[in-house]
Amino acid sequence: MTDYDATAHIAEEIQNAAVRAPQAIASALFLTYSLGFLFSIVLGFTMGDIENLLSSPTAQPFTQIFYNVLGKCPNYLCFSRDELLSFSKVWIRIISYTQTPLIAVWLNATLAVSINLIGLGSYTAIAAIFNVCAIALDWSYCIPIICKLIYGTETGRYIPGPWNLGKFSTPINCWSVIWTAFVSVIFLMPTNQPVTVDNMNYAVVILIGILVFAMIYWFVCGAQKYYIGPRTNQHWHKEKDNSWDFVSSLCENDQVTRF
């Protein structure tokens, strides 16, 4: 887990994002590989007996290592801004005291904590959720890559940014899609044999459920009528609703809204 997606979440707040955002992602990969290697060495020296880790009551050897050693010691804002979520005008509200979308922050924190609490009751359930998160996150990056591969050359509208892979772009793009398809299958496969009701990988069930919910929300609930993709400053200025009041943000040429 390189957590390179964190850069994408704050790209709209970065100056010169076309260069700084991919630079941050590349730096995250390099640092993760380097520090991860050192971290693996530390784990190797502190893990203790492997059999005890594998039979841990937490069913999570990594967590058990920390327990043995230490003892008992903004997504929703962007989706609301783009009117993809229900009650978007509530979540996007900027609190004047903090100058932040405090309601969206607490919504995000509450849902994140609630989902992780599932791990206290069922390792099988939380493992399936983590697998689906990995699949969904990776494919969210692959979708624009696939669009670029299919329509970029065909339409002639694709213009490389200041940070690009040059002549290696197409082969690397193709490999990223192939690799993501491969690991997606791996994430859906059972991790134990023989497969039983208790140890089955339910990621495929959750993934299908999410897809069904997304289709219903998009077509039946009418989300496609409001969501047109990420809103730009030009989109904001075209809004006719008097409830919008534009104020300058910390980054030049960026804007936030205050009610």
Image: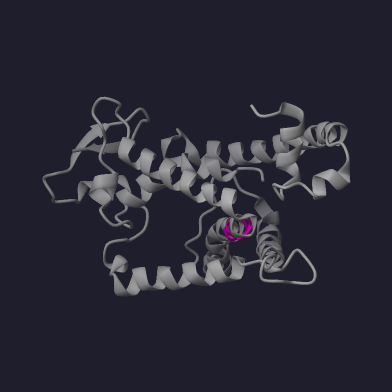
Taking the image as shown, residue 241 lies to the left or right of residue 97, namely left
Whether residue 130 appears in magenta in the rendering, the answer is yes
Closer to the camera in the image, 141 or 185? 185
Pinpoint residue 68: horizontal percent, then vertical percent. 76, 33
Taking the image as shown, residue 54 lies to the left or right of residue 200, namely right
Pinpoint residue 234: horizontal percent, then vertical percent. 27, 48
Pinpoint residue 34: horizontal percent, then vertical percent. 77, 34
| Image vertical order of residue 73 relative to residue 151, above or below | above
Count of all numbered marks drawn on residues in the image:
0
Decide whether the magenta segment is chiefly helix, strand or loop. Answer: helix
Q: Is residue 101 visible?
A: no
Pinpoint residue 174: horizontal percent, then vertical percent. 68, 64
Closer to the camera in the image, 94 or 195? 195
Closer to the camera in the image, 147 or 137? 137
Which residue occupies 58% across, 48% down?
Answer: 120
Q: Which residues are magenta?
A: 127-132
Whether residue 164 appears in magenta in the rendering, the answer is no
Residue 223 sits in which quadrant?
A: bottom left
How has the structure been colored for display? one colour
| Image vertical order of residue 220 relative to residue 166, above or below | below
Closer to the camera in the image, 232 or 115? 115
Which residue occupies 68% across, 63% down?
Answer: 187
Which residue occupies 64% across, 59% down?
Answer: 124
Quadrant (top left, top right, bottom left, bottom right) of the C terminus: top left
Q: Residue furthest left?
A: 242
Q: Is residue 215 visible?
A: yes
